[in-house]
Amino acid sequence: MPQLGESIAEATIINTLVNVGEEIAADQDLLEVETNKATMTVTAPCSGRVQKFLVTLHESYPVGAVLGYLEATQQEIERLGLNRQATAAENDRANGNGGKGAEPAKPGVEPTVRGLPVPAHAAGATYMSPRMKARMNELGLHAADLAGLPGSGAGGRVTIQDFENFIALLERSKLSAASSMRVAVADAMRRSWTRPLATVALPVWLDPMLAHRKLCDPKPGPALYGLRALAIALAENSAPAGRLVGNHIVHPNAIDVGFAVEAEDGVLVPVLRNADKRPLKELVPRYNELVELARERRVPPDATGGSIATVTNFGTFGLTWATPIPLPEQTLVLGMGAGRLVPNWDAAKGQFVPVMEANLTLTIDHRVLDGGAAGRLLSRVAALLKHPENL
């Protein structure tokens, strides 16, 4: 198995392209394989005859695994330097280190990328020694807490001595206790970050929303406009809000959407239930009530958990662009940036006119959604915001 790309450690056999006994040319495609990035082919290193394959379809093999044998000419063997390897193998057998016809064991994965905290295809904590994991459990630490700690062991592995030096350094530094909310937020974000996340964005005009808001009493917050638009879009197609569990997409039973509220030393996410079935005007009182309760850290149980997406208005901090992270149980988070006046060409007037524009971002679990589906969902939300009277 060749190295099919930087950081790719293995590939799955999906098809054989030649038959045993067939004469093949150098660089001819022999096997079709699938990696975590694309479908590729394994080519012949030289011309010759296919002697046998050692692979099973739909099984994965690491880089360096023997996939089969070619019967090559002496000229090709010498060109590739395989005659020296064959001599070494014969010596091993003569010394009793191997038997004739013995199949080689699958080698371990050896990625080409070096200097990473852990090798490719290894999960952080499982690459640590039992002693290291016991010491971390004793101190209540997670693998993510060591993200910035360079390891001195083989392959960049963090040794127990590295860890103890790190703890000693912490004890000499200024420390402050993290609040229970800060720890809870950190744990949620750590679990969320184990997934592949991606963000798409789209600028949207706020003028229709701002004009509509002036006519309302009480006035909806910008995040509530976004929440209601997202709820309608997901009611039309709930698949983007599904969660991947094993090999199944779990679709939501209800369009319950949360919204982020900054509280002391953290963020709370109250939930508006059935946001797709309640018009904007009806949602305003409950939204305002939950905002105040969240700031007091008194969100009621019926407005906690179970949401399928979150809306966050990072524009309140003057930010025009951000990449918020969805909660662990969610696939989506819609972000709204700060509005600002920008010039827009008006073809009818033949001149630029000022419009209030803001960026909408949508961060997704890339296992469930691809860029196209995320883009269509975000475009639908933007289209709904252009007609706030229909919300």
Image (spheres, rainbow, N blue to C red):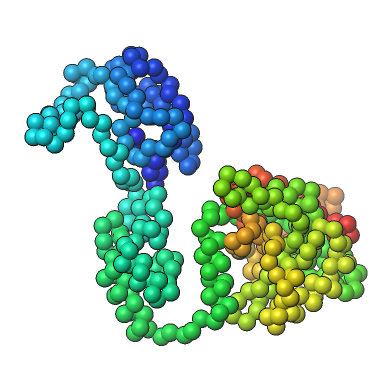
Q: Residue at x 68, y 80 (%)?
A: 297
Residue 286 falls in image quadrant: bottom right
Number of marks in the rendered image: 0
Residue 295 falls in image quadrant: bottom right
Of 229 and 278, nearer the camera is 278
In screen coordinates, is 183 left or right of 48? right
In screen coordinates, is 231 left or right of 128? right
In screen coordinates, is 351 left or right of 69? right
Q: Residue at x 32, y 21 (%)?
A: 52
Name above or below for residue 158 compared with residue 113.
below
Q: Residue at x 16, y 34 (%)?
A: 98
Residue 377 visible: no
Residue 274 in percent (x, y) is at: 80, 60
Residue 260 in percent (x, y) is at: 68, 70
Residue 284 falls in image quadrant: bottom right
Q: Which corner quadrant holds the N terminus?
A: top left
Name above or below for residue 43 compared with residue 113.
above
In screen coordinates, is 313 left or right of 275? left
Q: Residue at x 88, y 74 (%)?
A: 218
Residue 101 visible: yes
Of 334 and 167, nearer the camera is 167
Q: Which corner quadrant holds the C terminus?
A: bottom right
Residue 181 in percent (x, y) is at: 58, 77
Of 288 and 356, nearer the camera is 288
